[in-house]
Amino acid sequence: MVNPREAKRIVERVQKGIEASKDTPIWPHYINSLNLISQVVFVRASGFVLELIQNAEDAGLGLDEPGVFEIRLNKYRMKVTHNGRPFSENDVKDLCGIGSSKKPEKGMLGYLGIGFKSVFKVTDCPEIYSGGFQFKFDRSYWKNPIKTPWHVLPIWIDRPSETIDCDETTFIIPYREEAYYPGLLEEVRKLKTELYLFLRWLKTISIVDEVSEVSWVLENMGENEEGITALKHDGQQQKFKFFRRVCQVPDWVKHDRLTQQYRVNVTQREIAIAFALDHEGNLSPWEAGAMYGGVYSFLPLGEAKSGAKFPIQADFLVQPGREEINFEARWNHWLLEEVTELCKEAVDCFKKHDTWKYQFLPAFEFTKYAKVECYEKLFRPKLVEPLENFIQTDDCTPTAGEGWAKPKEVVKLSEDIEASKDLVAMGILKEDEIAPLLGGQPGLKLVHPNVKEPLSVPFKKVSRSDLLANESFLEHKAKESSAPDWFRNLYLWLAKYPSYYKSGKSKYVERYHDVKLVLSSTGEILTGGKVWLPDITPPDPMLKDLTETLQKSKPMLHPGILGNVKNEEEKKEVRGFLMGFTGVQALDSKTVCKEALLPRILTSASQPTPNELLKYAIYCQQILEGDVESGLEFWVLTKQGDVRAAKETLLPKELKPTEDWETNRKYVPGISFVSTSYLVDGTADEELETWRQFFYAGGVNEKPNNGVEVFAENWAKEKLESVYKNVIHVDKLKFGYDMEAETQTGEKIRIEVKGQSHEQDVELKDNELDAADMYKDSFYLCVVSSIPETPTMHLVKNPATPGVGKKDKLTIPVNIWKQAKWP
């Protein structure tokens, strides 16, 4: 430490030395240079913090005591202190110039000599206290600061502006404006442990916001024997795995002009990369694990973006202000080539680690920065592309057999781990068969299930779908003697490990109805819907014969699929899968009935004898229990003992149809009714309902065609003949009425008959309306209602009389025609 008197003389001597050039041409140029450096070169207002940290690291070079750096700020100033080596006379001179006496060949970080000038972004009066020196640069001290290089003219401080620890180096930076405080506070809050990943001496950075009285600490806990450094941010620990390499500077770099200017005596340099770890020690690479773009020249560079998910440290030549890297310098190209080789060494290390070997691939995925010059001209060609090519062409991917393969040589089985294991354990595939069979080409290997997949170049995915789509393999399996056992195991595996898919917000189980998956008795592999499963042992000889005939005509499930299963639970599971998930159809009594028996009673078949018809129909009704496809037409036996098409018949009153047409059948000549011989199992309501459904499904009519009209006319004629003479039908003559008759006095009347099953308004239209208008009182409307069971007749005279019917079409309301009940 220099004594105060000597320190003051040094400061004053430096000031006078600079002022001595006042009348020379250098003076105005110096002023312009300082203005540019302090306001233009440094982009970030907070950039001076990193510069002071770098100066502190240099000040700690060779010291045994761990470095401590403290930032205290309030609304008016920032105070920075550290315990590094105190200022010397040369340090004062460097601070008062734009050169530097630091030696990069000895490990010092600074070399431009202008870093401190970044404080002038926010202050006009920075104060420095170190090693007995106490001085400031003060714009307001000079009468004409615009024409004075005040940034480098030191002014001795007789009395410090606040309490100072003489054993530390202290910088007091009063803000030019109070408005700087919020922005500076926000910037120092961004300082994380990643800030000093690659610094060796500084171990602690503490930050205190004196306004809110909130403080936090960044700590470097050191590196263990495995190369893992632990960092703490306010108590929260973060770990990084480091790789370092000392590189000898090659001649082609030494002879470069920029190298000779800034690294002339440097013969070797250390480079480093770091990979973030989570709390459990797993590789957890992420771009945010490094500050800014992840490129460090001991401290992070502002705008240099490597695209890597791991921070990169090298003694890069950077642009003034530390914002950008010099992408044209051979020195930087060489360093980055060495970093690439170091990354390959890291891969070799990861491959030997029991856990990291499954986790390192995503660490070597890169973010691409189009139109970012340093990325396009430096990091992409020197780092990103060589590493991507290395990862893709080297054996970097762990396989399921604990071997290694290139990424393009592996496939990933998209099944649960347990499902994957059982695929082998259940004898469906051998482990070395899975990848080539499902991947569709020889030589493929199955990636180890623990491998973390890179998102940018994902592995080829294979699944059960690829197995089921491999028809040649399935056909090969179908020809083996053990085919039933193999296919049964496949069905059991698919049932045990169902696959799911999403549709909208809902989740559904995948089914295999469209997949050729089912082994038939002939050895063919068919879709389930084309295969039948015997599910009947009928005692009746006829049904037995029909069943055997059907089995010969349809593709049946291979008998060994279920026949060789001793465990009933397993058999049930296989049956359930085949019928529920593949669509295999059960050849049960209903199927036999529908396929072989029901067709014999259809009108499309030859007309059976009455006995055959009864036998077949009774079987069908008992077995199908109403499960008959609509639109069919049966042959049916009538009460008269003949066989007719169902459409020509009605249900008899014994079957309790909705409308009983049999009781008054004489009014509808020619109708036939189904025989009651079908009712062999009794006449209980439930039994009758089943028969009704069966017959209606087979085409039996609920009512005769035009039955209501025919019934009404015949009923009306019978009733009218009891009163009138010469009642005759004339409806075919299109007179607009159905009958003519004569009264006992010989007067001719015309009668239009309307029949109804249910009471409703009656309409006369077209020629009926004309006839009503023409014949007036000699025109009668005859309504026969409640057909067929309780017919009643109503006779309305002259329905066209005003107040009786409504015109356009003549509608006679129910309450009108009911008043004319007859007789």
Image (spheres, rainbow, N blue to C red):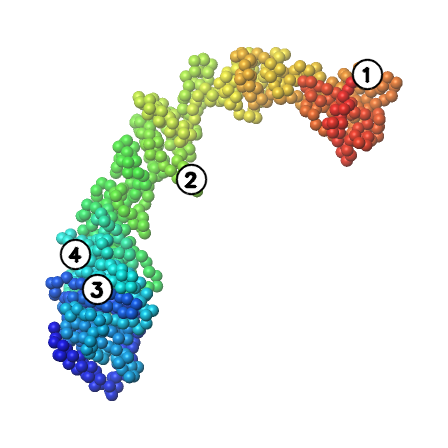
Q: Residue 225: x, y in percent?
A: 13, 53
Q: Tell me the CA gap for discs 4 and 3.
A: 19 Å
**Mark 1: which amino acid?**
Val
As drawn, 372 above or below 477: below
Residue that badge 1 annotates: 723
Mark linked to residue 222 = 4
Residue at image position (17%, 72%) is 130
Q: Give amino acid for label 2.
A: Ser
Residues under numbered marks 4 and 2 in contact, where contact means CB atoms less than 8 Å apart: no
Q: Earlier in the sequence, mark 4 or mark 2?
A: 4
The CA span between labels 1 and 4 is 127 Å
Mark identifier at residue 70:
3
State the SS at label 3.
strand
Three-letter code for the amino acid on which mark 3 is drawn: Glu
Of callouts 1 and 3, the N-terminal one: 3
Depicted 538 relative to depicted 99: above or below: above
First-in-chain label (1 vs 4): 4
- Between the residue at mark 4 and the residue at mark 2, the CA separation in whole angstroms equals 52 Å
Amino acid marked by disc 4: Gly
